[in-house]
Image (cartoon, helix red, strand yellow):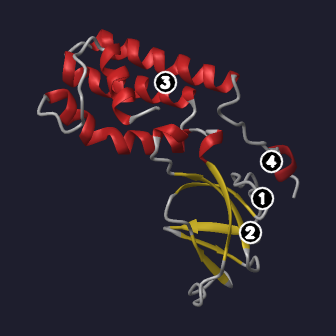
Amino acid sequence: MASVIQVANRALTKLGSARITSLDDDVKSARALKSMFDDVRDDELRAHRWQFSLKRTSLAALSTAPAFGYQRQYQVPSDFLKLDMVDDRFPQVAMDNYINAELLDYVLEGNLILTDIAAPLKLRYVARVEDPNGWDVNFREALACRLAAELAEDLTQSNQKRQLAWQEYQQAITRAVRSNAIERIPVPLGDSPWIIGRL
C-alpha cells in the first residue's frame, strides 16, 4: 500500500534527511513537506499527461449562457486540474494569423468551458488524484524527486544536493515517458508563415 508518508520519506532519503512518521510531526522537514505537498503534487499532475490521472465525463450545460461570444457554458468537475480534450478536440495553439478569424471551438475561462457545442459536452481532463494507491509508480518516484528538489535548499543548504535532485527528477520523467506512464498528445501542424503570408 502506497502512502503520502512513503513518498515524503523517499524525498527526505534522497537528501540524507531523517525520515518522518507523519506530516504533522513537529520537525522542520515535516512542516516543510506539509506546506508544499498538495501544491507540488497538483503541479506535477498538470505538468504532464500522466495516464492514471486522465478522466472522461459528459457535462450538462448550465442554465445561463455566457454574456457574449458563445451560446453555452459548462462547469468543470471539482477534481479538474487541466483540460485535455473537448468533444474529440485537443487544445492547440492557434498557429494562424488571419484577419477576422473565427472564434475558437471552445475556451476555458476560470472553471467554465465556453462553447457553441451542444450538450452533453464530452470532456477528457487531468484529474486531481489524492490517493497514492491510484498513482503510477513512475509518478511516485518523480514526485519524490520533485519534492526533494523543492526541499533541498531549506533542509540542507546545499545547492549541489538541489541540483542532483533536479537531475534525478528529469531522469524520472524520462523513464516515465519511456514506460508510457506519460501519454504524448497528438500535435497538429499549424499553417506555416509562408502559407499565412500568401493569404
- In whole angstroms, how far apart are the C-alphas of marks 3 and 1? 31 Å
Residue type, label 4: Gly
> CB atoms at circles 2 and 1 under 8 Å apart?
yes
Instruction: Determine the secondary structure under disc 3.
Output: helix
- In whole angstroms, how far apart are the C-alphas of marks 2 and 4? 16 Å
Looking at the rendered structure, which numbered label has been put on residue 89? 1
Residue named by callout 2: 105
Instruction: Determine the secondary structure under disc 4.
Output: loop
80 lies above or below 190:
below
Give me the residue at 45% from left, 47% from top.
130
First in residue order: circle 1 vs circle 4: 1
Percent across and percent down for residue 30 are 21, 32
Question: Image quadrant of residue 56?
Answer: bottom right
Q: Nearer the viewer, mark 1 or mark 4?
A: 1
First in residue order: circle 3 vs circle 2: 2
First in residue order: circle 2 vs circle 4: 2
Location of the C terminus by quadrant is: bottom right
